Amino acid sequence: MPHVPPKLNAFPVFMRVEGETVVIVGDGDEALAKARLLGQSSGRLRIVAPEASADLLGWIAANAAVHVARAYAREDLNGAALVFAASGDEPLDRRVVADARALGIKVNAVDRPELCDFFTPALVNRAPVAVAIGTEGAGPVLAQMIRARIDRMLSPSLGTLASLAVTFRDAAEKLLAKGAPRRRFWREFFEGAPARAVAGGDVAGAHAVASAMLTGPDTSTGHVALVGAGPGAEDLLTLRAQRLLMEADIILHDALVPDAVVAMGRRDAERIAVGKRKGCHSKSQSEINALLVALGREGRRVVRLKCGDPLVFGRAGEEMAALRDAGVSCEVVPGVTAAFAAAADFELPLTLRGVTSSMMFTTGHDLKGGALPDWAKLAISGATVAVYMGRSVAADVAGRLIEAGLSPDTAVAVVENASLSGCRRFHGTLADLPALEDRHDLAGPVMTIIGDAVAGANFSRSQALAALPVRGLTRNEVAA
């Protein structure tokens, strides 16, 4: 049998309340919650509260609501468009409901669905855009959970953009043919240059761009966002990263970005793996640069999804330069870099009052040259050092730093797959670090943190590096 969708018992509508009176009867938390909800509208609030709480009185004063400071009477409902019974007293709520219905006014009784003519939704407010989520009173907590998810998807500037769109509606209908030309204009308006200008606080610039789109030839261009995917856990993505992934036509992602993060993009977006692992480059950096430029010139919306933060060893500088030289607009969305995620996994302070007030990001390969890099001198002076991609050169890192004067007893923390449920943690000293180099089972990205502040970490869930074999050396020989 074909699936028959269930019928709604409450049909959702948006009711005009501008200039209308909305009455709330109640003086406690339930009344305050309804006042805050209705305060997002342009309705005139009349709150009947004989013994209003301090919080409710403060809200009334701050929002210029009318306060009826006496016991409820039927005449308090006169002229109301909507009524809310929010006293928490069932007999009083039933009386308010009966009076409202006798006057032909729709009424809602808080937490009493059997008495409600309508239900109040969980509301995502981007006025004039609003998204209302209802459960017919069956699951208010569920409605709030859904509201939170939708709220994350919508840009905070959407309301401003929608208000600007109203000013172009008549001109678009006059100047643009129905069908594809009009749809292209509005898509570019809401997702292209005007939207980006509004998001950046430049409403005047958005107006100018939209005007040029209306009167000139179709010059819509693509846009590339260099987005930080974070260290791996999908719930560490920023809200902006999530929104851009949902808007992207094409997602170019690093090899180490987990599938779960890539899957957060729009379902019909094209996905291209362009990442580079050690000794295995699916595309060279110049090829990636050329691809980004070509897609941008085709008018595509592109997300270049990078592990961690794009600006920390992510070659974002080369890609931004190529895009700028080609005249393709781009933006950078920061992500949680692996050093911060590793420190969080260890509950490790990267700076610690009285111990260290500075830190360095580097790669182990910086120590491969003949000269000691400048950051090594900072490590010796007490800075915390976060070493990216350092497993295969762990012995070089330890040996060179000890040779330069850093104590072999300096604390070290190592994390594989930071932020993920399967991460592994190791702790020890700089003298223990070479043992890491022979751990070929560490297939995920490895982050090493070195410095006196590491001693303040939580080592209860980590394995001692000293328990691992050191290639051809004893711990004492390395320390020597």
Image (cartoon, rainbow, N blue to C red):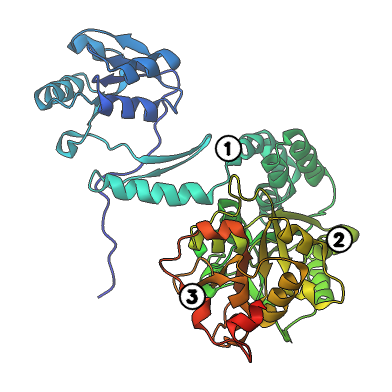
- Tell me the residue at 17%/27% (across/down): 88
Residue extending furthest toward the right:
325
Q: Earlier in the sequence, mark 1 or mark 3?
A: 1
Query: Residue under circle 3?
Result: 464
Q: Nearer the viewer, residue 342 or 459?
A: 459
Image mark for residue 159? 1
Residue 53: x and y, percent? 28, 18
Mark closer to the observer (2, 3): 3
- In the image, residue 110 sits, relative to residue 8, either above or below, namely above
Query: In the image, 367: left or right of 169?
Result: right
What is the C-alpha distance between the residues marked 2 and 1?
Answer: 33 Å
Amino acid carrying label 2: it is Ala
Residue 69 location in percent, x, y? 26, 8
Depth check: give the residue in front, 268 or 183: 268
* Residue at x 27% of width, y 12% of height: 78
Q: Secondary structure at mark 3?
A: strand
For marks 1 and 3, give the CA distance.
53 Å
Query: Disc 2, disc 3: CB below 8 Å?
Result: no
Locate the C terminus and report the quarter of the image it occupies.
bottom right
Is residue 125 visible in the rendered image? The answer is yes
Q: Find numbered disc 2 in the image and state the secondary structure of the residue it sits on.
A: helix
Image quarter where the N terminus lies is bottom left
